[in-house]
Amino acid sequence: MRLAIFNAIFIFCCCAWRVLALPDTIFIGGIFDAHDERQELAFRYAVEKINADRKILPRSTLRAQIEKLPADDSFHASKRVCKLLRNGVAAIFGPQSENTANHVQSICDAKEVPHIETRWDYKVTGDVYSVNLYPHPPALSQAYRDILMQLQWKNFVILYDSNDGLVRLQSLLQEKAFSITIRQLNSDGDYRPLLKSIKRSGETCILLDVAQETIFTVLKQAAQIGLMTDYYNYFITSLDFNLIDIEDFRYSSTNITSIQLISPKDAQVQQFVDSWVNGELRHGRSLPLHLRHITTEAALMYDAVHVFAKALDDLDSSSDIEINNELFCESDQTWKHGNSLINYMKWYSSRPYGVGPRPSSPYANMSRYPYYDRLDGLTGLIKFNTEGFRSDFQLDILEVDVKEGLKKVGTWTQVGGANYTRSWAEAVETVETNLHNKTLRVSIALTSPYAMLKENPERLKGNDRYEGFCIDLIDEIAKIRGFNYTFHEVGDKNYGSKDRTTGEWNGIIRELLDHKADLGIVDFTITYEREEAVDFSMPFMNLGISIIYKKAQKKPPNLFSFTSPFSGDVWIYMATAYLGVSVLLFILARIAPNEWDNPHPCIEDPDELENTISLSNAFWFTIGSLMQQGSDIAPKAVSTRIVAGIWWFFTLIMISSYTANLAAFLTVERMDSPIESAEDLAKQTKIKYGCKKDGSTYSFFRDSNIPTYQRMWAAMSNARPSVFTESNEAGVERVSKSNGMYAFLMESSTIEYVVERKCDLTQIGGLLDSKSYGIALPPGSPYTGPISSAILKLKEDGELHILKTRWWKERKGGGRCVTEESKDAANSAELGIQNVGGVFVVMVAGSVAAIFVACCEFMWKARKLATEEGASFGDELRKELLFIVNCSESSKPVRKKSSPAETDSSSIYDESSSTYG
């Protein structure tokens, strides 16, 4: 009970002391520029709000004393400050003008009166009796840097209108990761010439640091010259970009990023605006429309009055405050509590929240006393550093969205940096939404089968004039992503190559860099140099460089092609083996006793033995075995049978091998090609070779470090006349007409297309490298991701394979060479006289030889008979011929001789003759 009474008495004493501390009315001064109505209204409304709520200053009321003067009028500003000090103000707020603010600050410092500012101030060190609620410029510059790093900007242009902008952007200008071009806006209001020069430079990222009233004009003129498309990115440094009407830019799909300190959608801010408007109406004052939106500086002024009132209340809680009735600029008199009040304002908001007691004295070591309360204003948590600057604050990161207008996508803090709260899915959805129903300009170059004119194109209009693989591919992607497109032929008909002297690009890449096209599609090879200039989608076709050359001519069949299964050496070895084995068989037969037989089996004890394996019979036996025909001669001795068995084994293997290869050699047609690879080209000088000028193949050989390709480049670049062509079609035509004296190097996919239609051409060797075709987009294009994912879907669904089959093997004469090759393959199974003519030649030659030998034998026999019988050669020849032509006779009489000595020999002769005949 006693403790409760003691506490009640203590509280009563404290309240009584507090009541006696502050006067009933506290004057505060506000100096505002003549044209700045929002600052004055915010200042007046903050005073009315504090007086009405009675939560911060329960007994005392604030009374605003407002002075308005022209901007940069330092003389009158000094007079007005002295007037306010004579009226006994406890603090002075404003002005916004730099020159007048500096004069006001110097007077406040001299009189030790707190000076509270809400303006941008580039000073690094603060004044003793001043605090500034505006975000500190170095911290703002750090915020710009962090956000741009998150946006992955590397090269960009800074557009500024005053030197203050360069001060604000110090951290950016000192960042080595950025390549920055600085351009200042002129003062006549026509920024189009400068914007056009930026467009010509190819820069797509623009940082805009200009006055609030200039932002809309700059963006409007940028839209007029084509700088507000999908490929341009803007970062607006103004904290009041949310007050600009963005309806004209909302559907441009331009990437516009900005920041804000206060959110118009915040409940506290909306309540403040409603109360502001209604309060003015209650006082009989109607606010114009342009004053019904709160600016950052107006919100800062509102928060500044609350910071002052809170610090004044905290100071009153710890000491007895006396506010001077008047101060004179001419005297040395100062306000003794000014230093304490300004320290409370600084240190109050620099301490952690909710820990420790309040300090008993403003002159104590303030770092030891964390404060109990915190102040969250319209501009967020209010904290100052020891210099009186506000360096710890939070910014909202905004982006222009088609659906929601200005949308918050992240926040920035000094500790955490830029933190995007937007998910990856939301970012993709935004891009896809922008792409939907948008009409893209697609740049193409006519080349088969990727992009071609239809038959009678003059009768057709627009996209209907074109057909081809790439035309169908764009159509399939458009169906997936829901955009429209128009095709446009590039003026110089080039894909895009970089001039080594000027560094300028031509062709489709030039149009993409100039943003005259949204997409570029053709047989566009993705190279490092091109990738550095523009963006590429996921590859829709993989390929490599190869050689197209005149198809090798078919060799005319060799008359003796039946000898092809064995080489000449093998035939020589076989002939040698035949001779050797025949002679060996003859010798062994004469050595082996079992080979000598009784010629007359009826005679048991003959006078002589006979050997049937004579030299001629040995040759006949081996040749019969070789021809798989056999003979009546059979070896009897073991040794001769061994030789015969080995010979039969030899002939089995050789004949089987010959038969197996004979079919292939007779049916497969041989091609005679002088080159089989790139190495063959590099080693010779007779056949010229080249590629398309300024194409990716041209760059490949020019920049290659491989010795073979370096030699090839040297040969191509030094060849006269030039071996380079203006197009792939010209190169193919040159190959067709060169009769094997020219080879052309180009992508394998195009070679596949050509050889399907030109049956006299073929691909030589494998791939010299590995590369891909892709769709080119302007650098930084937001549509690269959606286009790539659509290509991936088409690849997974097999649509790309279907498209390639359609345009390579079905349309425009595709598949013709496959049909002809099938016919040739069927015909190759039929052996013509060219293939087996040699066999007939051998047969005829053998028959002629047999006839010749028979005639010789016949004439030799007739001469021998004429000699033996003493008749003339003509008579004997006539008799024999008459007998031969009498085909009805199948037996011939034996001629008898009169001499007994000749009887035996004649009978033997007659027996052999009857057998012979």
Image (spheres, helix red, strand yellow):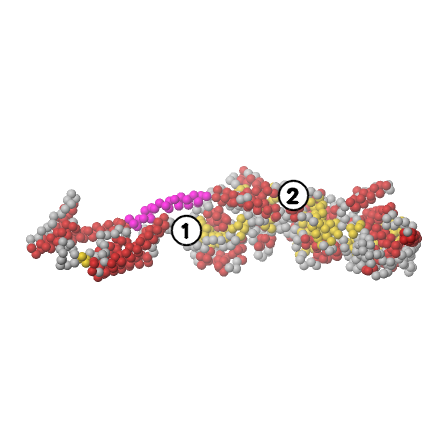
Asked if the stretch drawn in magenta spans residue 319, the answer is no
Q: Residue at x 10, y 50 (%)?
A: 895
Percent x, y of residue 628? 28, 51
Q: Nearer the viewer, mark 1 or mark 2?
A: 2
Q: Amino acid at mark 1?
A: Ala
Image quadrant of residue 904? bottom left
Q: Is residue 34 visible?
A: no
Tags 1 and 2 in contact by the CB under 8 Å rule?
no
Q: Left or right: where does residue 644 sit relative to residue 610?
A: right
- Which residue position holds label 1? 552
| Count of picture labels | 2
Q: Dot 2: what SS?
A: helix
Image quadrant of residue 617? bottom left
Mark sitting on residue 543: none
Q: Residue at x 27, y 49 (%)?
A: 843
Label 2 Cα crowd, 10 Å radius (few <14 / some 14-19 / many 20+): some
Give the distance between the C-alpha atoms of the residues marked 1 and 2, in whole angstroms. Answer: 56 Å
Percent x, y of residue 81? 87, 54
Q: Which residues are magenta?
A: 815-840
Q: Is residue 325 visible?
A: yes
Q: Left or right: where does residue 649 sit relative to residue 332?
A: left
Label 1 Cα crowd, 10 Å radius (few <14 / some 14-19 / many 20+): some
Percent x, y of residue 399? 70, 47
Percent x, y of residue 395? 74, 51
Q: Left or right: where does residue 312 sit relative to residue 703?
A: right
> Which of the two residues, 693 or 141, is positioned nearer the viewer here?
141
> Which of the two residues, 667 or 16, is positioned nearer the viewer here?
16
